[in-house]
Every structure is written in C-alpha cells, then in structure tokens.
Amino acid sequence: MHLIIDGYVRDPKKIQDKEFIYRFLDTYPSQIKMTKVSSPQVSQHVRASQSNHPGISGFVLLAESHISIHIFPERSYVNIDIFSCGDFDPEEAMKTIEREFGLIGARSYAINRPHADVE
Amino acid sequence: MHLIIDGYVRDPKKIQDKEFIYRFLDTYPSQIKMTKVSSPQVSQHVRASQSNHPGISGFVLLAESHISIHIFPERSYVNIDIFSCGDFDPEEAMKTIEREFGLIGARSYAINRPHADVE
C-alpha cells in the first residue's frame, strides 16, 4: 500500500519546525507496525525563487519501504508519502496525518503496489 | 509528477549490487535536471523470513522531491519512485529505468501531484 497525501496546513509555523518533522518520522513507523532501517534524514534547502522560505524535506527508510515528507513553507503546503509492503489502514493513517499536521483541504490517493511475494 | 515503477529484473545480480544503486541515485537526478540536496543513502536489511537475501533500499533527497528504490533480491523485484515538482518526461524516465535496471514485466503509474505554486 502506498498512501499519497498532498495538502495545506492550518498553522504554517508547525511545518517550519525541523524537529517536528524529525520526531514524526522517528515515531510514526512503530505506530503502524513498520520497522525503521535508518534514522530519519531531514534537510532544509533554499530555492532561488523563495529564498526567505527554505523548503524542508524528510525521509525515513523502513524495511522495504519508506515515509517521505516535503514541505513548502511559503504556501503552507505538504506532500507526504507512506509506502509500506506491510499492511496498514490508509484511512486510519490519513486521520493521524490530518491531526498531526493540522491539514486542511488535503487530497489523498491509496495505490495498491503489488508485493513480489504475493504474486 | 510522481512516477511509480514496480517490476522484475532480468539479472538478479545487478540489483544485489549496492554500488550500482548508489551510482544510479547519485547520477540520475542531473540527467532529468533535478538537484540533489543530500548524498544518496543506501541500506541493506535482513528480514527474518528471507535471511539469505537481504533487501536493499536507497533514496536521494532532491529539492522538494526524491527518488527511492526498494529491492527484493529473492524475487528479482524492484519498486522505484521518481517524484519531482519539476518537469520531467515520464515516458523517457521509464525507458531509462527499464534499460538501466534491465526491467521485464514492469508496471508504472504517473501521478500528477499538483504543486502548491501553480494552484
């Protein structure tokens, strides 16, 4: 299952906080029974056109899967991917993400990516 | 644009090579005019059920986007994501991936994830 979420946040300050992003990537996998295989990586980067609002991207590798977050602070916009070959409930995950990030107007897609082992 | 590719490879040895995965993640972004914001991270991990065939996962963070690769050597299976807020041609990218990885029987999805700046 690959859950893709794109949306806006109510409180832009929240998503400008690298620590918040790191903590989410560090603690969320165990909530949906996924196993981290690395520490989260969170990086800030300045685009020439948006020099006052550096973007933030974060990533954590899970066993054969990952969670990624890309933040566009100048537009209060986020892209979040939760990709796991294990089972998780996309509706439950969506609710958690909406609550944790204070999402408004989010759009999501759940893609069933077949796992080689079950084909 | 988010291009999702799931498929089998002709030569299992190729995808057991961590160096090959690292080199791809290191060099491919510039081919499609994307900017790396970190070095690639590639990690090997053993699943209890497949202890003879450790999985390999890799990703590289790009400016507001990423490329990720998950390898299942015991089934010669790969999951590849190319997610960029910049423009790239998904058909061209698919051709490159098929050639580089020696893919057979690949399935792909191109998802247009709207960028906040253009809404």
Image: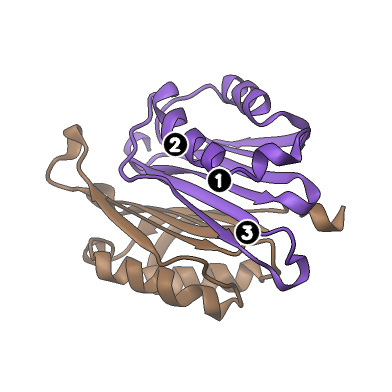
Chain colours: A brown, B purple
Q: Mark on residue A98?
A: none
Position of residue A15 in the picture relative to residue B62 (left or right)? left
**Marks 3 and 1, how far apart at CA:** 14 Å
On whether disc 2 and disc 1 are found on a single subunit, the reply is yes
Q: Secondary structure at mark 3?
A: loop
Chain letter of the residue beneath label 3 in the structure image:
A
Task: Using a 10 Å C-alpha cutoff, classify the residue at mark 1 as few (fewer than 14 neighbours), some (14 to 19) or many (20 or more).
Answer: some
Q: Residue placed at 62% from the left, 69% from the top?
A: A91
Q: Residue A4, percent across and down?
A: 55, 53
Q: Where is residue B107 drawn, in percent x and y?
A: 75, 36
Q: Check contact, mark 3 vs mark 1: CB within 8 A.
A: no
Q: Is residue A12 left or right of residue A107?
A: left
Which residue is labeled 3 in the image?
A64
Distance CA(mark 2)–CA(mark 3): 21 Å
Residue that appears at 23% across and 66% down: A17
- Type of amino acid under label 1: Lys
Task: Choose mark 3 or mark 1, whichever is in front.
Answer: 1
Residue A109 visible (yes or no): no
* Most foreground residue, A42 or B26: B26
Secondary structure under tag 2 reads loop
Q: Amino acid at mark 2?
A: Ser
Residue density around tag 2, few if under 14, some if 14–19, many if 20 or more, within 10 Å:
many
Residue at mark 2: B84
Query: A99 or A24: nearer the eye?
Result: A24
Q: Position of residue B100 (x, y in %)?
A: 62, 27
- Identify residue for label 1: B18
Alpha carbon distance from label 2 to label 1 = 24 Å
Q: Earlier in the sequence, mark 2 or mark 1?
A: 1
Chain hosting mark 1: B
